[in-house]
Image: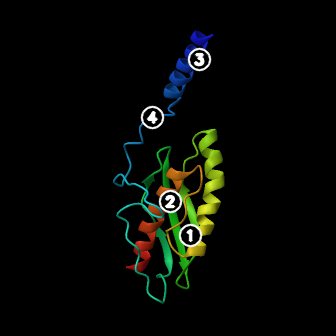
Amino acid sequence: MIYTKRMLLVLVLATAVVLGVWAAPPADTTSAFYTWNGRQPANVPEIPVSSAGYTDGTFIGRRESAYYGIVQVEAFIQGGNIVRIKFLSFPNDNGTSAYISSVAVPQLKQEAIQAQGSHVQLVSGATFTSEAFHLSLHSALIQAVN
């Protein structure tokens, strides 16, 4: 019986490796590795927004690694406020990633619009996507301030 459990464990681990569950992050990421420390990735300063808000326009953020795919967003600013956020890319190349993104994407967009900034709470189960969203939106909003 113990031998059978060990064989099953080896089979599960081998299958996970083959399917890429523990694969390394994509090498083509455009940003440095980052860590999450509470509410924001390390080394990402707050954006100094004037009382007038952001500059009106459409601003595209950097492509950021979400481990299982790339996240890139576009921020729409009107009247000095974030009025809409569009995901240009997000992890969706397999069923699990597509499901997680279908839950995380609307939550992240809603929270960022409500907060009028990129500092949002992590979505449970979508940590990498949340971090990448923050970084991509942050880079878009920096353009809206300059």
The answer to whether the residue labelled 2 contacts the one labelled 1, judged by CB atoms less than 8 Å apart, is: yes
Secondary structure of the residue carrying numbered label 1: helix
The answer to whether the residue labelled 3 contacts the one labelled 4, judged by CB atoms less than 8 Å apart, is: no
The image position of residue 65, as x and y in percent, is: 44, 50
* Picture disc at residue 112: 1
- Figure check: 15 above or below 52: above
Hey, which quadrant is residue 26 in on the image?
top left
Point out the residue furthest to the front here: 2
The image position of residue 79, as x and y in percent, is: 55, 85
| Among the two numbered marks 2 and 1 on one chain, the one whose residue lies closer to the N terminus | 1
Q: How crowded is mark 3: few (under 14 residues within 10 Å), some or many (20 or more)?
A: few
Q: Distance between the residues labelled 3 and 1?
A: 44 Å
Q: Distance between the residues labelled 3 and 4?
A: 21 Å
Left or right, residue 68 beside residue 143: right
* Picture disc at residue 8: 3
| Among the two numbered marks 3 and 1 on one chain, the one whose residue lies closer to the N terminus | 3
Return the residue nearer the eye: 117 or 80: 117
Q: Distance between the residues labelled 4 and 1?
A: 30 Å
Return the residue nearer the eye: 129 or 85: 129
| Among the two numbered marks 4 and 1 on one chain, the one whose residue lies closer to the N terminus | 4
* Picture disc at residue 133: 2
- Figure check: 48 above or below 132: below
The image position of residue 93, as x and y in percent, is: 57, 41
Q: How crowded is mark 4: few (under 14 residues within 10 Å), some or many (20 or more)?
A: few
The kind of residue on which mark 2 rests is Phe
The kind of residue on which mark 3 rests is Leu
The kind of residue on which mark 4 rests is Ala
| Among the two numbered marks 2 and 4 on one chain, the one whose residue lies closer to the N terminus | 4
Q: How crowded is mark 1: few (under 14 residues within 10 Å), some or many (20 or more)?
A: many
